[in-house]
C-alpha cells in the first residue's frame, strides 16, 4: 500500500518523506550507489561489477553483459574476471575508459580514508547524481544520494575511515531492517507529505492526516492448526470416508478467540491513527 501511495505522489509531482515502506536502504538509487562502492572496494566482486554495468552509469544491455562475462576466460590480467575484461573494453570505448579512470581515482581516495570524498566522487565525478536527476522523481533520488554523503562523513567523525566500515554499516542497517527514512526533497520542516505506518507515527501529531486502507485487517482462521498462549491447540479434522476436512468445536473456539483479540488490536491501532490528527482527518477505505 505504501509503495502505491509513493508512486501516486511521484506521478503527481508531490514531494514526500517516507518513514517506513520501501525505506532508504531499499531505494533504487541507494542500491546503485552501494554497488559502485563495492566495485571500488573490490573490483573482483563479479556481482557488483555486473550491477555497475547494468546500472545507470553504463546501462549495459544483456548482450553487453554477456560479452563482458564471456570474456573472463580470455582475460590475461589476473584474476581473469569481468573487471579485467572491462578494462580491455575500455581501450576502445572512451566512456568506459573515463569510468574506469574515475573508479581507480576513488580507490586511491578510499585507501587514504576519505569516505566522504569517495561517496561524493561516485555522485559527481562518475555521474550517479546526474543519472538520478534524469530519472522520474529525480529530486527525491538526489536527496537520498546526498544523504549518503552525510552518513559517510558521520562515520569519518567517529574515526571510521575504511570503505569497508561504510559498506558494513550500510549493509548491517539494511539487513536488520532498522528504520531509516528516505531523504525529503526539502528540509524536515518543509511542506512535504509524510508517509508513516501507524506504529512509526506514535507520539507524532499533524494538522491534516489521511488514514488510508482502513478496511485492511489481519485474517484469522487460516491454516489447519491453531495454538494460543495458554498452550491450547486444535486441528481441523479429516473425514476418513469423504476425505474432506471439517472444523472441530475446539478449533472454532480458538479461531473465535483469535478474531476477538485481532479485533481489539485493530481498534487500538485505529484509535492511535485517528488521534494523530490535530485539525482534520480524512479516512479512506472501502467495503465489500
Image (cartoon, rainbow, N blue to C red):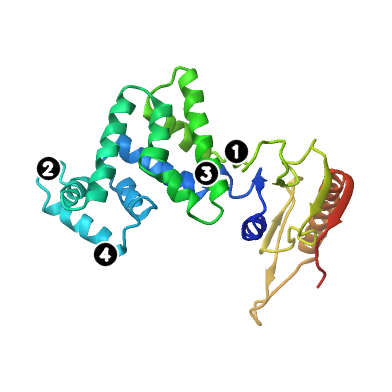
Circle number at residue 63: 4
**Crowd band around label 3 with a 10 angstrom C-alpha radius: few (<14), some (14–19), many (20+):** many
Q: Residue furthest right?
A: 279
Mark sitting earlier along the chain (4/2): 4
Q: On the image, which quarter does residue 100 sit in?
A: top left
Q: On the image, which quarter does residue 229 sit in?
A: top right
Q: Position of residue 139 (x, y in %)?
A: 56, 47
Q: Left or right: 31 with respect to 4?
A: left
* Front residue (pair 162, 263): 162
Mark sitting earlier along the chain (2/3): 2
Gap between marks 4 and 2 measured at Cα: 23 Å
Circle number at residue 198: none
What residue did someone put label 2 on?
Answer: 77
Q: Position of residue 7 (x, y in %)?
A: 62, 59
The secondary structure type at the circle numbered 4 is: helix
Gap between marks 1 and 4 measured at Cα: 37 Å
The secondary structure type at the circle numbered 1 is: loop
Gap between marks 4 and 3 measured at Cα: 30 Å
Mark sitting earlier along the chain (4/3): 4
What residue did someone put label 3 on?
Answer: 142
Image vertical order of residue 157 relative to residue 90, above or below: above
Question: Taking the image as drawn, is residue 175 in sight?
Answer: no
What residue did someone put label 1 on?
Answer: 180
Q: Position of residue 92 (x, y in %)?
A: 16, 53
Amino acid at each position: 500500500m505504501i509503495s502505491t501511495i509513493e508512486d501516486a505522489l511521484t506521478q503527481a509531482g508531490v514531494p514526500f518523506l517516507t518513514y517506513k515502506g520501501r525505506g532508504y536502504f531499499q531505494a533504487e538509487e541507494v542500491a546503485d550507489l552501494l554497488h559502485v562502492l563495492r566495485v571500488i572496494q573490490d573490483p573482483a566482486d563479479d556481482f557488483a561489477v555486473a550491477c555497475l554495468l547494468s546500472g545507470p552509469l553504463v546501462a549495459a544491455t544483456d548482450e553487453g553483459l554477456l560479452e563482458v562475462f564471456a570474456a573472463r576466460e580470455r582475460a590475461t590480467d589476473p584474476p581473469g574476471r569481468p573487471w579485467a575484461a572491462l578494462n580491455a573494453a575500455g581501450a576502445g570505448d572512451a566512456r568506459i575508459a573515463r569510468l574506469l579512470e574515475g573508479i581507480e581515482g576513488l580507490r586511491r581516495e578510499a585507501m587514504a580514508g576519505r569516505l566522504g570524498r569517495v561517496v561524493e566522487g561516485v555522485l559527481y565525478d562518475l555521474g550517479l547524481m546526474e543519472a538520478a536527476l534524469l530519472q522520474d522523481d529525480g529530486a527525491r533520488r538526489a536527496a537520498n544520494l546526498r544523504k549518503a554523503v552525510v552518513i559517510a562523513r558521520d562515520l569519518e567523525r567517529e574515526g571510521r575511515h575504511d570503505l569497508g566500515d561504510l559498506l558494513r554499516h550500510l549493509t548491517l542497517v539494511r539487513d536488520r531492517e532498522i528504520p531509516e527514512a528516505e531523504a525529503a526533497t526539502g528540509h524536515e520542516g518543509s511542506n512535504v507529505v509524510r508517509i508513516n505506518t501507524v506504529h512509526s507515527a506514535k507520539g507524532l501529531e499533524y494538522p491534516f492526516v489521511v488514514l488510508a486502507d482502513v478496511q485492511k485487517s489481519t485474517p484469522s482462521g487460516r491454516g489447519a492448526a491453531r495454538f494460543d498462549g495458554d498452550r491450547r491447540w486444535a486441528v481441523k479434522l479429516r473425514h476418513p470416508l469423504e476425505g474432506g476436512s471439517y472444523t472441530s468445536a475446539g478449533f472454532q473456539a480458538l479461531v473465535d478467540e483469535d478474531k476477538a483479540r485481532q479485533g481489539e488490536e485493530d481498534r487500538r491501532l485505529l484509535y492511535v491513527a485517528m488521534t494523530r490528527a490535530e485539525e482534520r482527518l480524512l479516512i479512506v477505505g472501502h467495503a465489500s
